[in-house]
Amino acid sequence: MESQNQPTQQSSKGTTFLRTCFNGLNALSGVGILSIPFALSKGGWLCLIILFLVALLCFYTGLLLKRCMDSDPLIKTYPDIGELAFGSKGRAMVSTFMYLELYLVAVEFLILEGDNLHKLFPNAYFHILGQKIGGKQAFVLLTALVILPTTWLRSLGLLAYISAGGVVASIILVCSVFWAGAFDRVGFNERGTLWNWSGLPTAISLYTFCYCGHAVFPTLCNSMKDRSQFPKVLLVCFVLSTISYGSTAILGYLMYGDNLTSQVTLNLPTRNISSKVAIYTTLINPITKYAIIVSPIATAIEDTFPFRNSRYISVLIRTVLVISTVFVALAIPFFGYVMAFIGAFLSISVSMLFPCLCYLKISKASRSFGAEMVMIMVILVMGSFVAVVGTYSSLRGIVNQAQPK
């Protein structure tokens, strides 16, 4: 998602295979890695099979988007595919789901910062306008103040380097979690449960969130020097990210079992160096990614104003956008269930349902009955079912968490 605003480049000046892999990996290996052990604890050990199945299906739907792009050289972005398939209503639908997904991911970043900073400094508080503010709320506000100036910048020219940093951060996180279990006396002693039906909707929703990079796939494909290499880029990104997710899920579940919180870093003991490395790495990532996440939303809003090139209007819009995410983060500070809602309601639509529907509409060859048609129909039926059940389950979780205890 971070790459949605990347400038489109011609084939002679496009990005290399390696740089596109970095951007793709950064889109797939985001904050979802923190909740993947929690997802496994919700569904049980056999739920790992579903993780690999979700990865396979999302890889396939990524290929469907590539085929949609091949049908018209003018397609540059995901909304373009929606418009080609279903006209202006298709563009509006895809854009709405895309931007809402980006917006809620930005909210997740603030919740993430608040949770982890509060774990490091549980007794810290601040005085703002004569009011004493402490706990997670204080760190959400502080993070927003730090992030705000970065959102005023429009240039995303260093995107590939930021993406490389995000990939390295994910590797450091996995290594830190392993170190905490192997050498910091946490151990890998939890047995966990084999299968848990009641937690399955939440687990699948979180898994889908982890593979919600489809919003940027058309942009990444269009930016390459050789677009025919994009299926290989997808293969590399999905294989490496699945290894990363699977490793983190297994390590975290073996370490903490059913006691896992929504973020594995919140389980780690803060007295150990490895835990501090994991938490600080987790804290740096959202700060570097927040501006890139909200930039497409801000640009879309700016384009609706007559003074779209005004620097002051741009700063005002981006400031209001940050403030709004702060309010949402303070009102719904439930990281795991908010992520599950994004996965169920938005990510399944953007990553599974829309690619299949657009491909069926655009490609005449796909309409003939065969193995591919059966595959697409299975994805649509299963995806719709999981979307409904997962959305209900996550909203119920948010309501239960919000009720005073």
Image: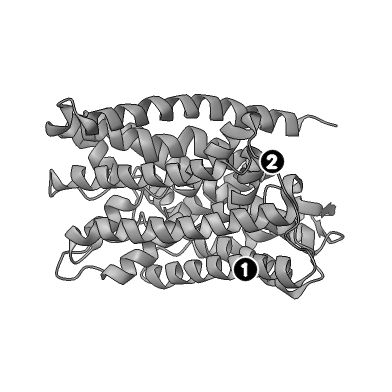
Please indicate whether residue 321 sits to the left or right of residue 189 in the image: left
Question: Which quadrant of the view contains residue 369?
Answer: top left
The residue that mark 2 highlights is 193
Residue, x 59% and y 33% (percent of image)?
200
Q: Residue 6 in the image: state x and y as whole percent.
A: 33, 60
Q: Amino acid at mark 1?
A: Thr
Residue, x 46% and y 36% (percent of image)?
346
Q: Are marks 2 and 1 in contact (CB under 8 Å)?
A: no
Say if residue 323 shows up in the picture: no
Report the colour scheme.
one colour
Q: Secondary structure at mark 2?
A: loop
Q: Residue 309 in the image: state x and y as whole percent.
A: 34, 56
Q: CA distance from mark 2 to mark 1?
A: 30 Å
The residue that mark 1 highlights is 281
Q: Does residue 64 lie above or below 217 as drawn?
A: above
Q: Residue 159 in the image: state x and y as whole percent.
A: 39, 67
Q: Does residue 22 lie above or below 245 as drawn?
A: below
Which of 313 and 124 lies nearest the eye of the viewer? 124
In front: mark 2 or mark 1?
A: 2
Q: Quadrant of the C terminus?
A: top right
